């Protein structure tokens, strides 16, 4: 298995660059209607991390994710992508994959066409992209559905297409905005396992927005708990657990303890916002 | 119109692929009606019966209508100058073909050239409106003035300015067909999923890429609604404008032949002309519907049969 995240720098395999993937310093975001969505957020994202942004609705976690993606400017503060090539607009072009809350597929394109899109926008021809697209479809278990249209797929399958599309450019950073919130519990657990598997295989850095304590505790090795009004980082928890997460881990004492710790922190965050 | 085709593709559809895997979908049981046939045999038979019904019922109904018309005329001995029967009408269609067919050709030519110009103009203008806010603002008053003025009221003016009558008729038909196409296409181009816009922005798409790969395909359902409305209106406008023009002679279309038949109380020919117009309308509707189906049947809800 090749280390895809650092494929551009093969010499770095012995000593992988430990440059940060994203660094935010005192980033605030004020919407045009005067709402302060995010206040003084500072966050350093190290390569290979799986970070969950956890918090109640309105805590600015989606806003933060969009700023990290380069969609929408921060009102104050600075954000940088130290390990990415920055384009003329000051954005890390091609190094970020984004999975939205909805699958956000083009209904007039086949599954193949949807996954091919990021490469198409870069001017890669269809025949040159075919292998890469099919490889990514296979990695989410949808190789047989390449010619299907999104309307023929179930909600979980659409989400898989969305994930394959986000990974097709081999991004350094994968941003996921409550991707499984609309799915049923069984599909959600399956997709959680799939995401962990993809994370382990590709070495991509993941920032995962969620409002589920259990999901964040299961997936991440770092949980950033946020509080609302104004959106702020409340606590930054390192989860010191082995990478092996499976159904046995779901029922383990260690998992329960983490859930409790995270849940406590979230409760304190919510109460501190109310008082 | 455009509301009916609004982007409802978010709606969850039945997942056929998953339903077909185990041979026990609840839907099939209601269709079998106690037969012991296998699922795979039952389904096509149902659809075949449905297909035959779909063809036979309208034809029989239409035939009965014509028969009733024929019986009414012959039993009541209605004179032809008041209401010709279907036989007289068909005779007129056959024997007046020397006057009717060239007239039909004139009307069809005006309708289609007007529709073609309206399509090109409407789509280009819609794209300009969506790409440039300044252009949209500048165009807005003209669009409103032209849209709220009944175009037929402008016809006498166009007849003065245009070099000849066919051109004048074409301009009238164009003006009528133009706005539904323009407004539907512009609406469609603007109604793109915001998350998809974000996605294109994230991947650094150039504005021509966003237009070509996202906005234009996404606006197709709206454009098709505009095309169907515009196609029907172009024919209506071509006829009404010819009434207004009142031109006569060699180069005249079906509308003039209608008026002429009325003056001469030649009702069979009037009916024949009406039938030709009706057939032209049907042909335009069928053609635009077919183009719409061709573009949308693979992905848009409006072109897909609902399964419950």
Image: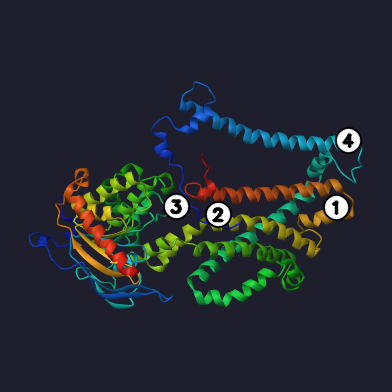
| Disc 2: which residue | B5
| Mark 1: secondary structure | helix
Q: Residue B308 appears at what percent x and percent y?
A: 51, 39
Dot 2 alpha-carbon crowd within 10 angstroms: few under 14, some 14 to 19, many 20 or more: some
Q: Are marks 2 and 1 in contact (CB under 8 Å)?
A: no
Residue ID for mark 1: B261
Which one is closest to the eye, mark 2 or mark 1? 2
Residue position marked by numbered label 3 in the rendering: A108
Q: Could you tell whether B173 is left or right of B289 in the image?
A: right
* Between marks 2 and 4 in the image, the one whose residue lies nearer the viewer: 2
Kindly report the distance in space between the C-alpha atoms of the residues bearing marks 1 and 3: 50 Å
Residue A115: x %, y % from top left: 34, 53
Check if mark 2 and mark 1 are on a common chain: yes
- Which residue occupies 86% across, 42% down? B84
Q: Nearer the viewer, residue B105 or A70?
A: A70
Q: Residue B61 placed where, x, y %? A: 72, 36
Q: Is residue B60 left or right of residue A193?
A: right
Q: Which mark is residue B74?
A: 4
Q: Looking at the image, which is closer to me, A217 or A67?
A: A217
Instruction: Give the alpha-carbon distance from disc 2 to disc 1, as whole Å.
Output: 41 Å
């Amino acid at each position: 298995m090749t280390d895809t995240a650092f494929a551009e720098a093969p010499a770095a395999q012995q000593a992988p660059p430990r440059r940060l993937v994203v660094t935010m310093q005192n980033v605030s975001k004020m919407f045009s209607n005067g709402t302060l969505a995010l206040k003084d957020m500072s966050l350093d994202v190290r390569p290979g991390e799986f970070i969950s942004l956890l918090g109640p609705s309105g805590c600015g976690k989606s806003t933060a994710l969009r700023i990290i993606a380069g969609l929408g400017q921060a009102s104050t503060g600075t954000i940088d992508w130290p390990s990415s090539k920055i384009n003329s607009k000051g954005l890390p072009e091609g190094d970020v994959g984004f999975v939205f809350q909805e699958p956000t597929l083009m209904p007039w394109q086949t599954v193949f066409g949807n996954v091919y899109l990021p490469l198409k926008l870069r001017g890669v021809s269809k025949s040159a992209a075919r292998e890469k697209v099919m490889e990514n479809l296979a990695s989410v278990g949808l190789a047989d559905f390449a010619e299907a249209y999104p309307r023929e797929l179930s909600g979980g399958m659409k989400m898989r297409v969305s994930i394959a599309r986000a990974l097709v450019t081999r991004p350094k950073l994968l941003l996921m905005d409550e991707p499984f919130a609309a799915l049923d519990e069984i599909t959600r657990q399956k997709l959680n396992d799939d995401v962990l598997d993809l994370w382990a295989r590709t070495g991509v850095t993941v920032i995962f927005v969620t409002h589920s304590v259990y999901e964040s505790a299961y997936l991440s090795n770092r949980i950033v708990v946020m509080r609302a009004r104004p959106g702020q980082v409340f606590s930054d928890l390192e989860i010191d657990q082995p990478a092996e997460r499976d159904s046995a881990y779901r029922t383990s004492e260690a998992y329960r303890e983490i859930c409790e710790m995270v849940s406590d922190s979230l409760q304190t965050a919510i109460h501190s916002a109310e008082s | 119109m455009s509301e009916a085709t609004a982007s409802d593709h978010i709606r969850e559809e039945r997942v056929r692929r998953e339903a077909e895997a185990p041979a026990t979908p609840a839907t099939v049981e209601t269709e079998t009606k106690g037969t012991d046939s296998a699922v795979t045999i039952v389904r096509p038979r149902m659809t075949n019966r449905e297909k035959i019904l779909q063809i036979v019922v309208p034809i029989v109904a239409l035939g009965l209508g014509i028969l009733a018309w024929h019986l009414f005329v012959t039993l009541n001995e209605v004179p032809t100058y008041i209401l010709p029967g279907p036989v007289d009408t068909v005779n007129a269609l056959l024997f007046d073909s020397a006057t009717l067919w060239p007239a039909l050709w004139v009307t069809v030519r005006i309708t289609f050239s007007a529709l073609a110009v309206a399509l090109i103009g409407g789509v280009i203008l819609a794209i300009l409106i969506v790409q440039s806010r300044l252009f949209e603002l500048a165009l807005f008053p003209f669009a409103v003035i032209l849209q709220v003025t009944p175009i037929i009221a402008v016809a006498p003016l166009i007849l003065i300015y245009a070099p000849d009558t066919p051109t004048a008729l074409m301009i009238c038909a164009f003006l009528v067909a133009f706005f539904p196409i323009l407004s539907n296409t512009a609406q469609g181009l603007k109604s793109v999923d915001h998350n998809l816009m974000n996605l294109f922005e994230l991947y650094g798409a150039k504005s021509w890429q966003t237009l070509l790969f996202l906005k234009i395909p996404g606006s197709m359902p709206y454009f098709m609604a505009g095309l169907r409305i515009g196609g029907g209106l172009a024919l209506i406008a071509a006829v009404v404008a010819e009434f207004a023009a009142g031109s006569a002679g060699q180069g005249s279309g079906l509308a003039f032949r209608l008026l002429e038949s009325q003056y001469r109380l030649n009702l069979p020919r009037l009916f024949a002309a009406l039938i030709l117009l009706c057939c032209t309308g049907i042909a335009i509707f069928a053609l635009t519907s077919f183009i719409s189906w061709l573009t949308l049947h693979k992905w848009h809800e409006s072109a897909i049969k609902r399964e419950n």
